[in-house]
């Protein structure tokens, strides 16, 4: 058995590559020995780790091979894991009456870098145990290309490097980065990678290697620098259950009947009162949400409209609005005060994102009420953790809001997005 065949058999045996996986692009004149496996292997395997890179071109095969690592560290890997699970769901729905064709990405594939250690005498695939170094995912969304998403499990040597590591710190540990970059350069046009997002240390190291190999310059500073905050839903029963009635469970997946909960403001008078309403995003909210999205993220008007439609279609947006009630009973149209979206959900976890309150209604507790209801609803949907990303430069009020809800910052889990010059970065 040839060396490449031996390693490929080991990956098959341990379930880290599927026979259906195949490289998406093959350089002219380059012979690919086996599907999905890089030719960048040494002549012989030694106790010192060697590297190989596998390519997975469908979500189901990727999760079968890599899912155990992604699920083990769901808070760190949630972007890759949730997008992968969403792709499986959308592909299963394709062709059915509930198909959401507009949400299907134009492309998606996954690369995994492995460390291979064995003695020269190893003849059986069972004797070669691959260790996962990192995962990279390239995908498009309804807004265009996503950043290149990176993840490295806590058991990898990359994850154990000191925070101030550079590309010269540990050549053995960092050789996996070079292998992944080499393979990536053979698969995609170089200018199609507009940015990279993932754990701070991993992204910093990747961008240095990528720029040195491609002669592409990265921007002078990261596009986003984010702290990760976590809320254990089982510990948050004090948030809303005692103040307001619980939310109802959605009655159907199409959103014909959406969650709504109303209560009268304590300051209401006989002449003029206010009814506050926490509810899912509705068709009539589109124009207001388009404006709010441009306040909270780098959307242009067209992107904001596309994203608002995506939130409505997939029931991912929540609002708190205020409706005036006058005597005799007349109701003026409601106005959205606070907004948030619930994105990147997996079986146990959900991400709350783009939390915003209108400037003239801040510091009045509206966001606290909205997020309390959303957390309560997520708990009823079976999620046991909620996470959110907060820019490192975020003002103190949002931090007080999150701490008041029970969120705690996850140590050593900062995320950054770093872009490259002469590229267009889409919000996501």
Image (cartoon, grey):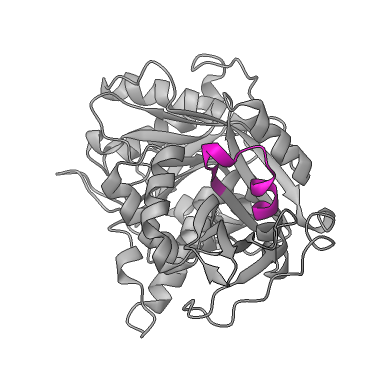
Q: Please state the extent of the stretch shown in magenta in the rendering.
A: 353-371
The single residue placed furthest to the left in the displayed view is: 28
Residue 75 visible (yes or no): yes
Which quadrant holds the N terminus? bottom left
Magenta span includes 283: no
Name the residue rendered at 55%, 50% in the picture.
337
On the image, which quarter does residue 297 sit in? top left
Q: Nearer the viewer, residue 235 or 362?
A: 362
Reply above or below: 113 against 418: below
The single residue placed furthest to the bottom in the displayed view is: 97
Q: Give percent across and percent down for residue 317.
A: 51, 59
Reply above or below: 417 against 19: above
Name the residue rendered at 47%, 57% in the picture.
83
Reply above or below: 1 against 292: below
Q: Give percent across and percent down for residue 119.
A: 59, 39
On the image, which quarter does residue 238 sit in? bottom right
Reply above or below: 346 against 418: below
């Amino acid at each position: 058995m040839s060396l490449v065949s031996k390693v490929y058999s080991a990956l098959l045996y341990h379930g880290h590559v599927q026979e259906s996986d195949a490289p998406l692009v093959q350089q002219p004149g380059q012979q690919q020995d086996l599907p999905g496996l890089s030719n960048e292997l040494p002549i012989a395997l030694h106790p010192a780790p060697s590297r190989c890179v596998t390519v997975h071109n469908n979500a189901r095969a990727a999760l079968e091979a890599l899912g155990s690592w992604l699920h083990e560290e769901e808070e760190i890997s949630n972007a890759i894991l949730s997008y992968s699970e969403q792709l499986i769901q959308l592909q299963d729905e394709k062709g059915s009456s509930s198909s959401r064709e507009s949400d299907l990405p134009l492309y998606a594939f996954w690369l995994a870098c492995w460390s291979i250690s064995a003695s020269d005498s190893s003849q059986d695939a069972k004797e070669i145990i691959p260790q996962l170094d990192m995962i990279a995912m390239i995908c498009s969304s309804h807004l265009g290309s996503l950043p290149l998403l990176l993840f490295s499990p806590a058991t990898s040597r990359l994850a154990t490097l000191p925070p101030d590591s550079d590309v010269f710190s540990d050549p053995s540990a960092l050789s996996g980065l070079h292998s992944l970059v080499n393979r990536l350069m053979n698969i995609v046009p170089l200018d199609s990678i507009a940015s990279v997002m993932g754990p701070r240390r991993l992204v910093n190291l990747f961008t240095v290697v990528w720029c040195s190999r491609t002669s592409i310059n990265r921007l002078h500073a990261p596009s986003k620098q984010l702290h990760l905050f976590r809320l254990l839903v089982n510990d948050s029963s004090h948030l809303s259950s005692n103040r307001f009635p619980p939310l109802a469970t959605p009655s159907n997946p199409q959103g014909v009947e959406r969650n709504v909960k109303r209560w009268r403001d304590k300051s209401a008078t006989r002449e003029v009162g206010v009814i506050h309403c926490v509810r899912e995003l509705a068709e009539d909210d589109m124009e207001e949400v388009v404006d709010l999205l441009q306040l909270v993220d780098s959307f242009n008007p067209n992107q904001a409209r596309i994203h608002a439609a995506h939130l409505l279609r997939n029931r991912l947006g929540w609002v708190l609005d205020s409706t005036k009630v006058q005597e005799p009973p007349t109701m003026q149209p409601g106005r959205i005060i606070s907004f948030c979206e619930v994105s990147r959900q997996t079986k146990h976890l959900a991400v709350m994102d783009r939390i915003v309150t209108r400037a003239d209604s801040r510091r009045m507790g509206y966001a606290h009420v909205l997020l309390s209801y959303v957390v309560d609803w997520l708990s009823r949907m079976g999620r046991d953790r909620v996470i959110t990303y907060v820019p490192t430069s975020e003002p103190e009020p949002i931090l007080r809001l999150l701490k008041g809800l029970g969120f705690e910052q996850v140590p050593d889990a900062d995320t950054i997005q770093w872009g490259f010059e002469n590229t267009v970065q889409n919000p996501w």
